[in-house]
Image: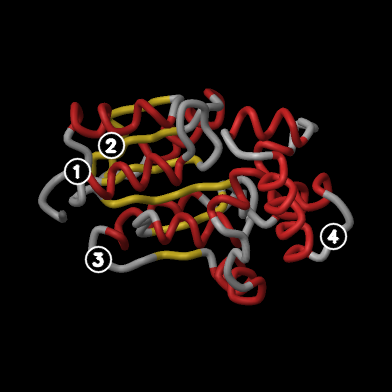
Amino acid sequence: MSDRTIRILLAEDQSMVREALAALLGLEDDIEVVAQVARGDEVLDAARAHDVDVALLDIEMPGATGIEAAAALHRELPGVKLVVLTTFGRPGYLRGAMEAGADAFLVKDAPAARLAAAVRTVLTGERVIDPALAAAALADGANPLTDREREVLRAAADGSTNAELARTLHLSQGTVRNYLSIAIQKLAVRNRTEAARVAREKGWL
């Protein structure tokens, strides 16, 4: 990569943050932001259109999350390096990003120099992970919820009744009740509201 400029795709839904990151990275002699998108579902097409080397992906975006976008890029364009950025240092996000094929995971308030260094590092084949997040992820352990338990808990977060959840998810009310009960038990909380809150704080939903 030393013989040419590193081509960057920046995916971030907040325009001020996106423009600030682009400006900071643009100060680096060997880095050029060649594409910017505000939605996760625009990432793959933009990466293809602009022949990017590295995609910087915010986690929380409309259309698709940064983790979902990373998984799509990893599957369709495996040569593109993936750097996931987050405002929230949630251990579950780190695990999800790594499982999606991310090469780096950093918090957004990291110094610009660290972000630029991470971009260069992943192009050498190494991974870059925020050390505090790595320690927190190890301390928290793996997500105890199954995919179906997460789906039901995520759907229940808006206060829907069991009957409404059953219709939405095409399950019986008894099945919905069982999934919620198991999730509440696993997370050692009193009700579905607390379960959704805890799971979201840990990045498990």
Q: Which comes sooner in the sequence, label 2 or label 1?
A: 1
Q: Find disc 3 in the rendering and name its residue.
A: 125
Query: Closer to the camera: disc 3 or disc 1?
Result: 3
Labelled pair 3, 2 in contact (Cβ < 8 Å): no
Q: Which residue is mark 2?
A: 32
Q: Residue at x 25, y 34 (%)?
A: 47
| Disc number placed over residue 5 in the picture, else none | 1
**Crowdedness of circle 2 by 10 Å Cα count: few (<14), some, many (20+)?**
some
- Tell which tag, 3 or 2, sits nearer the viewer: 3
- C-beta proximity under 8 Å, tags 4 and 1: no
Image coordinates for residue 90, horizontal then vertical, percent: 63, 56
- Mark 3: amino acid: Gly
Instruction: First in sequence, mark 4 or 2: give its number.
Output: 2
**Nearer the observer, 122 or 28:** 122
Distance from disc 4 to disc 1, alpha carbons, whole Å, reads 51 Å
- Which residue is drawn at the image coordinates 38% and 54% (left, top)? 100
Circle 3: element type: loop
Distance, label 4 to label 2, CA atoms, is: 48 Å
Label 2 secondary element:
strand
Which of the numbered marks, if any, corresponds to residue 165? Answer: none
